[in-house]
Amino acid sequence: MLYERWWEIARARRDELALRDLAAKRDWTFAQLAAAGERPSSHPGPIVFPQGISGEFILTVLRAWRCGQMICPLEVGQPPPVFAQLPTGCVHLKLTSASTGAARAVAFHAGQLVADASNIVAAMGLRPDWPNLGVISLAHSYGFSNLVLPLLLHGIPLTLADSPLPESVRRAAQHEPAITLAAVPALWRAWHAAAAIPPNVKLGISAGAPLALALEQTIFTELGLKIHNFYGASECGGIAYDRSTTPRTDATCVGSAMPQADLSVGESGCLEVRGQTVGQTYWPTPEAALAGGRFQTSDLAELRGGLVFLRGRAGDQINIAGRKISPEVIEHALLSHPAVHECLVFGTPSTDPARAETIVAVVASNVPLTDAALRDFLTARLAAWQIPREWVWVKSLPVNQRGKLSRAEWRRKFLDETR
């Protein structure tokens, strides 16, 4: 199904540029990419593990589709997991975590990948004359769904940059008169700080972490470029997309539902997704949260006026003497301060058993600030018990390969340093 659809695209657009790998200094037309995909695979066995941001990743996917092999994309340097058996009828595994021992993956059949790609192309308005500039991981669900599948199933050309560094992105963008640029907030911030956002970006997309309103507004004011917030999950692909043409006014809003996503809020207050894009099951151990075309996220949400508003994660809530607060609520208040450009909030065990937890805020600011100054600022925005008691000041908050900040990692680091 996937390979046949690819061949239809390749035949229809055979002489047009399909893929450009700037690091390898190689270009492929659709016909050339199709021919290269017909060459023998160098990866025997029932499953292949493409890695890297390269043309070879794309070719590995094509050859696996042709040979009927399952695909399990990996980050560079990530060891391949070992599965005792593979899920029947599935063609793709997305790894979510292997930190607790055995690899945990989400299994997809071909139709679910096709539906996810169609969802993204339709919702975002991806166009062949606005090629994707690839700077994010192709192994992550975001990169695979936004860059790899639109190329192979919809003919959206892809240019792979040799680096996400500002000057490299600026050079890479010069190869096309207009581009689509999908990235994470940390990259958008770095490019803006270096005045390196290419002027020919026609469509800007941000996912993987919350996009600060101040950054969204600043880029729009200075460059006239609207950055569209995209919200999804490995288990079901795209969930919601901000289709508005002007900056958001509420940082908790992640846009409206994707075309094929049926959204609801369950009894737990968490968002539930139903539709053709939802994966088959967790593998190798199924869970009730992902089954029968339904995925229950751990994101607390509100659906209002056709829009999705995230209210934090169920497992991240902080308990202060029996009262619960989502760290996102405090983060949004902190980010409304003009000098705060990044922050992360989490709870740690309190020395006072009656209090249960202590709120800790990790803050990166553009100018020197003090704990007292931020406490005073938050007094008008939060209840007294919601204001952090512990403060950690940093120059920046580094993200992982997927462009995410980990509360668990920062909590562990804080506890190790304060014991």
Image (spheres, grey):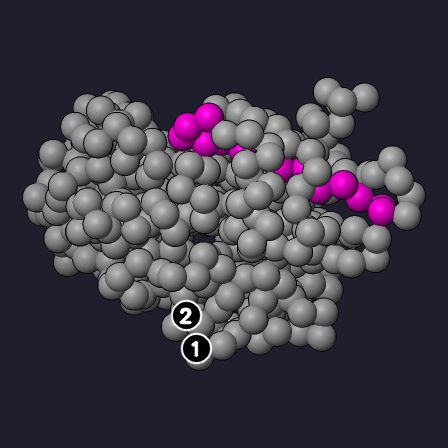
Residue 42: x, y in percent?
A: 42, 29
Q: Nearer the viewer, residue 1 or 77?
A: 77
Q: What residue does disc 1 label? A: 306
Dot 1 and dot 2 residues touching (CB under 8 Å): yes
**Is residue 196 part of the magenta span, yes or no?**
no
Would residue 303 be found to the left or right of residue 30 on screen? right
Q: Residue at x 85, y 47 (%)?
A: 355
Q: Residues within 10 Å of mark 1 (few under 14, many from 20)?
A: few
Give the residue type at disc 2: Ser
Main SS, magenta region, reads strand
Identify the element where label 1 is drawn. loop
Rendered image quadrant of residue 78: top right
Would residue 105 be found to the left or right of residue 249 on screen? right
- Residue 204 higher or lower than 89, as above or below: above
Q: What residue does disc 2 label? A: 256
Which residues, given as a range, are shown in magenta? 355-368
